[in-house]
Image (cartoon, rainbow, N blue to C red):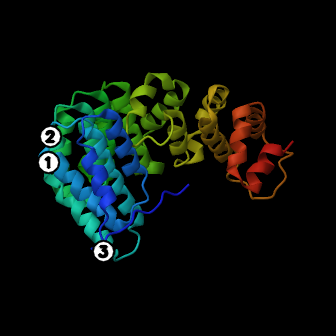
């Protein structure tokens, strides 16, 4: 259900978001959590988002010892990400520009937070930085230096993802990501590099990165906990890795078929959805819609058999919601 729009004052500003931000400074954990939840979930106007960003920046600057600062930074990142999603027109509306200017004004603070002693706060600050292309000139040298200095593995993974998103077109960034992938790093750090390179290079992704994604699907427990801690995670590491495989040419993924089929046996609902889509992509994407699947190849038959015998895949197939997918699953 959509949240109720806050009532605006005559001056055109809203008191409710400001009040919620002020409550973040309270000592009571339950009050802070409730206010933070409302700020994340509220259906705020662009003007109200600018107010929230301004108030958060003032709060973070004025009270550096506040608990939950990482959550506040993630809220700023959500505001920055929302703007990026809206910014498809050549000239954004004035209110969107004001929101963006407010977020960018916090760049000196974000640079400080990247150096903090709290790993979770560094991680959140990296996620925010990734959504600030206007600050690339200031952020890129700091992120590259942090990649040399950072010791916490999951933060190193976040550095890889932030660098790719912020400056993936830069040759030096791609070289650093490739070096991270090849180095004797912790599994989550190497996975971060593999994810970043796959998103950047797609068909040209190094085979080392592709194999690492497939191994992660086969043995997710090695990195699952650390991956869930990354703000970039959309679902589980299995589902997200499987989604990325569909960015690659099918010919490079034939070796992965047994792993994907086996992963269905222990997949949860959303993992099965992703795995089913990837298997259908590998086995059937080159065929014309509407053709008969009765004369399927052995590979196609194996894929359909795996989908039929997996309850989670049957549930996932319902979410595919396309006639062709249903035809593929029901072909005999």
Quadrant, the C terminus: top right
Element class at badge 1: helix
Task: Determine the CA span between mark 2 and mark 1.
Answer: 6 Å
Density class for disc 2 (Cα within 10 Å; few <14, some 14-19, many ≥20) is: few
| Residue in the foreground of this view, choosing between 32 and 176 | 32
Where is mark 1, residue-wise? 61
* Residue at 68 percent of width and 49 percent of height: 320
Task: Give me the disc on residue 302.
Answer: none
Would residue 51 be found to the left or right of residue 281 on screen?
left
List x then y, in percent, for residue 17: 32, 56
List x then y, in percent, for residue 227: 41, 32
Where is mark 3, residue-wise? 10
Element class at badge 3: loop
List x then y, in percent, for residue 258: 64, 29
Where is mark 2, residue-wise? 64
Task: Determine the CA span between mark 3 and mark 1.
Answer: 29 Å
Q: In which quarter of the image is residue 273?
A: top right
Q: Earlier in the sequence, mark 3 or mark 2?
A: 3
List x then y, in percent, for residue 107: 17, 54
């Amino acid at each position: 259900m959509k949240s109720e729009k806050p009532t605006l004052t005559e001056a055109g500003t809203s008191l409710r978001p400001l009040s919620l931000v002020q409550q973040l400074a309270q000592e009571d954990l339950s009050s802070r959590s409730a206010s933070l939840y409302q700020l994340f979930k509220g259906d705020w106007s662009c003007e109200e988002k600018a107010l929230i960003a301004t108030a958060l920046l003032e709060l973070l600057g004025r009270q550096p010892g506040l608990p939950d600062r990482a959550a506040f930074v993630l809220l700023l990142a959500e505001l920055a990400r929302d703007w990026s999603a809206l910014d498809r027109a050549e000239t954004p509306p004035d209110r969107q520009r004001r929101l963006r200017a407010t977020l960018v004004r916090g760049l000196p603070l974000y640079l400080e937070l990247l150096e903090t002693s709290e790993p979770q706060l560094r991680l959140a600050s990296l996620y925010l930085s990734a959504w600030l292309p206007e600050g690339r000139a200031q952020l890129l040298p700091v992120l590259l230096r942090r990649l040399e200095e950072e010791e916490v593995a999951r933060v190193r993974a976040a550095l890889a993802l932030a660098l790719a998103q912020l400056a993936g077109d830069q040759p030096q960034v791609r070289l650093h990501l490739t070096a991270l992938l090849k180095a004797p790093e912790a599994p989550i750090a190497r996975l971060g590099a593999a994810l970043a390179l796959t998103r950047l290079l797609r068909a040209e992704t190094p085979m080392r990165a592709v194999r690492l994604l497939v191994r992660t699907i086969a043995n997710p427990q090695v990195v699952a906990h650390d991956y869930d801690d990354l703000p970039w995670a959309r679902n589980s590491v299995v589902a997200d890795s499987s989604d990325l495989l569909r960015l690659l040419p099918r010919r490079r993924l034939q070796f992965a078929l047994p792993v994907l089929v086996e992963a269905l046996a222990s997949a949860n609902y959303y993992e099965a959805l992703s795995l089913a889509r990837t298997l259908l992509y590998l086995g059937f994407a080159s065929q014309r819609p509407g053709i008969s699947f009765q004369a399927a190849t052995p590979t196609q038959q194996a894929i359909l058999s795996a989908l039929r015998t997996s309850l989670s895949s049957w549930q996932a197939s319902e979410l595919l919601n396309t006639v062709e997918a249903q035809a593929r699953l029901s072909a005999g």
